[in-house]
Amino acid sequence: MEFTRCEHCGILNALSRSGARFCSPKCRVYWHRAAGKLPSELTSHDRWIRRSAEKVPLQLDGRAASSTRSSTWSSFKAASASTVGAGLGFVLNGDGIGCYDLDHCMVGGKLTPTAAAFIASHPGFYSEVSPSGDGVHIWVHAEGQRGSKRVIDGLNVEFYTRGRYITITGKAIKTTA
């Protein structure tokens, strides 16, 4: 029996069949509806990969992907149809898309006041819950620059525009606390 994480809810389950991506039809339907709402700023680029449950970047055939080798990336359509790994990722290559990664900034499914204030002052074109369930990814338009890790008002903030991939959950959030 294969144990893996559901791509929607993240619960570790014995999935019903080899290669299954979701623990239930409800999770499968919810994930596909949410994924259909990802912004074209992301879906129109062929910079998609799969990822393992441990966040290792994977190609569609299961081999290791690279955040710096475009030959290991694919289209959104192909990556979202694949059953390899535990989820999706988008590669940042310095061409105008960046991502803020806020850690441990949600409690009980709601943004902390500090996170809500940060998001209000750094509006992006898309924000979503990270795979941990208590973090947030804020996708923004940004020129390529060196990545950074900072603590701002007690909030752990990472920012990347190139040489990285960021996980995608499709769980969009409202940006109010």
Image: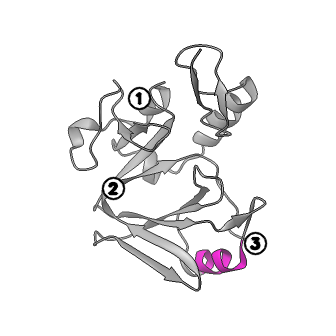
Give the residue drawn at x 57%, y 19%: 2
Q: In which quarter of the image is residue 145?
A: bottom left
Q: Is mark 3 on a helix, strand or loop?
A: loop
Earlier sequence position, callout 2 versus callout 3: 2
Q: Distance between the residues labelled 3 and 1?
A: 35 Å
Residue, disc 3: 177
**Pointers 2 and 3 in contact (CB under 8 A)?**
no
Q: Which label lies toward us, 1 or 2? A: 2
User: Which of the numbered marks, if any, corresponds to residue 78?
Assistant: 1
Give the residue drawn at x 44%, y 54%: 41
Q: How far apart are marks 2 and 3 (CA)?
A: 29 Å
User: Which of the numbered marks, if any, corresponds to residue 164?
Assistant: 2
- View extreme (bottom): residue: 153
Q: Position of residue 75 (x, y in %)?
A: 37, 36
Is residue 31 one of those drawn in magenta? no
Residue range (magenta): 112-120
Which kind of residue does numbered mark 3 sit on? Ala
Q: What element carries label 2?
A: strand
Which kind of residue does numbered mark 2 sit on? Arg
Q: Which label lies toward us, 2 or 3? A: 2
> 126 above or below 64?
below
Which kind of residue does numbered mark 1 sit on? Ala
